[in-house]
């Protein structure tokens, strides 16, 4: 039943205290993007057996069927580690996004380089419905800024959200030209749709713009921060709070979407 060709929001289930909250966010995003849902559980020799996991997932899926219809709710019990099934999730099961609690980020984030879809880490327990109305996106001379902005447009145009583009300061003329070119490209995309956006000028260089975007997003009552996966990150980067793991650790109640821009991403259909 899972291979039905419809894009799905995968929701990471670990039966921890964060499970209900994670499902709430996954449902909210699926409703915004008008996508189906798949509850995914990774089978572990130290945890439930397959039959027990199937029963518990079915119990969780029951109430969701009333919202989406039973034909739009799917269950996936992963028999292998998540890193080895990411391609299968996308190519065979049409995964568009994986939603997981921030408590699982240390396990999942190192797997993101193999994924062609973003990971969304969540923690807000009470206002999932308000967590996708304000979106912060860092913009620099890195071309991956376009991927972040594209994903912000998916949510903004389907949810009437406002996007804040946090623009880095470039010191060299060529970098300035690239930043302006990327910003112009993003703004041209946004003008095709009916949602609000703003450009926030900063005095922050590219290497610190992700942290600056976090600071800006924390001013939101609730909100979403979209960042790119940090490759070749060092202990120094973490000390300065400029890599993705540090951003997630300090994101408080924000939802944080991490995108792997080193691979072609699967795009929203419909």
Image (cartoon, rainbow, N blue to C red):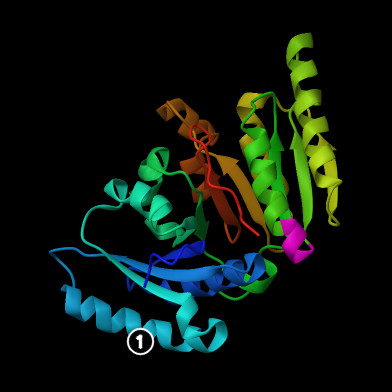
Figure quadrant of the C terminus:
bottom right
Query: Where residue 158 sits: x, y (%)?
Result: 73, 63
The answer to whether 214 appears left or right of 180 in the picture is left
The answer to whether 213 appears left or right of 57 in the picture is right
The answer to whether 215 appears left or right of 186 in the picture is left
The residue at which mark 1 appears reads as: 59
Q: Can you name the residue that lies furthest to the top here?
A: 173
Residue 251 in view here: no
Tell which of 86 and 28 is nearer to you. Answer: 86
Q: Can you name the residue that lies furthest to the left here?
A: 45
The stretch in magenta equals: 156-160
Query: Where residue 15 sits: x, y (%)?
Result: 33, 74
Judge whether 12 appears above or below 167 on screen. Answer: below
State whether the magenta stretch is mostly helix, strand or loop: helix
Figure quadrant of the N terminus:
bottom left
Residue 237 in view here: yes
CA neighbours of label 1 inside 10 A, class few (<14), some (14 to 19), many (20+): few
Q: Considering the numbered disc 1 on the image, is that residue within a helix, a strand or a loop?
A: helix
Judge whether 232 appears above or below 269 on screen. Answer: above
Q: Can you name the residue that lies furthest to the front here?
A: 4
Q: Residue at x 45, y 62 (%)?
A: 101
Q: State how many labels appear.
A: 1
Quick check: is 187 in the magenta stretch?
no
Q: Which residue is drawn at 48% across and 35% down?
A: 263
The answer to whether 214 appears left or right of 82 in the picture is right
Q: Residue at x 59, y 48 (%)?
A: 267
Residue 54 picture quarter: bottom left
Query: Where residue 109 sits: x, y (%)?
Result: 40, 46
Quick check: is 157 in the magenta stretch?
yes
């Amino acid at each position: 039943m899972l291979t039905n060709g419809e894009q799905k929001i995968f929701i990471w289930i670990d039966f921890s205290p964060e499970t209900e909250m994670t499902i709430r966010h996954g449902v909210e995003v699926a409703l915004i993007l008008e996508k189906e849902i798949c509850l995914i559980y990774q089978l572990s020799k130290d945890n439930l057996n397959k039959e027990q996991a199937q029963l518990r997932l079915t119990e969780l899926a029951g109430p969701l069927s009333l919202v989406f219809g039973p034909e739009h709710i799917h269950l996936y019990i992963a028999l292998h580690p998540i890193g080895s099934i990411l391609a299968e999730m996308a190519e065979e099961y049409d995964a568009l996004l994986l939603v997981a609690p921030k408590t699982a980020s240390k396990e999942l984030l190192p797997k993101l380089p193999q994924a062609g879809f973003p990971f969304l880490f969540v923690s807000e327990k009470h206002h999932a419905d308000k967590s996708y109305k304000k979106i912060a996106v860092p913009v620099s001379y890195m071309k991956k800024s376009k991927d972040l902005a594209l994903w912000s447009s998916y949510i903004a145009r389907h949810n009437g959200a406002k996007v804040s583009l946090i623009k880095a300061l470039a010191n060299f003329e060529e970098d300035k030209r690239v930043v302006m070119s990327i910003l112009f490209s993003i703004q041209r995309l946004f003008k095709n749709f009916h949602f609000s956006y703003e450009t926030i000028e900063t005095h922050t260089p590219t290497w610190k713009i992700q942290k600056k975007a976090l600071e800006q997003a924390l001013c939101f009552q609730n909100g979403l921060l979209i960042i790119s996966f940090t490759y070749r990150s060092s202990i120094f980067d973490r000390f300065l709070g400029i890599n993705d793991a540090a951003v997630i650790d300090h994101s408080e109640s924000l939802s944080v979407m991490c995108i792997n821009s080193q691979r072609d991403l699967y795009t929203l259909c419909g």
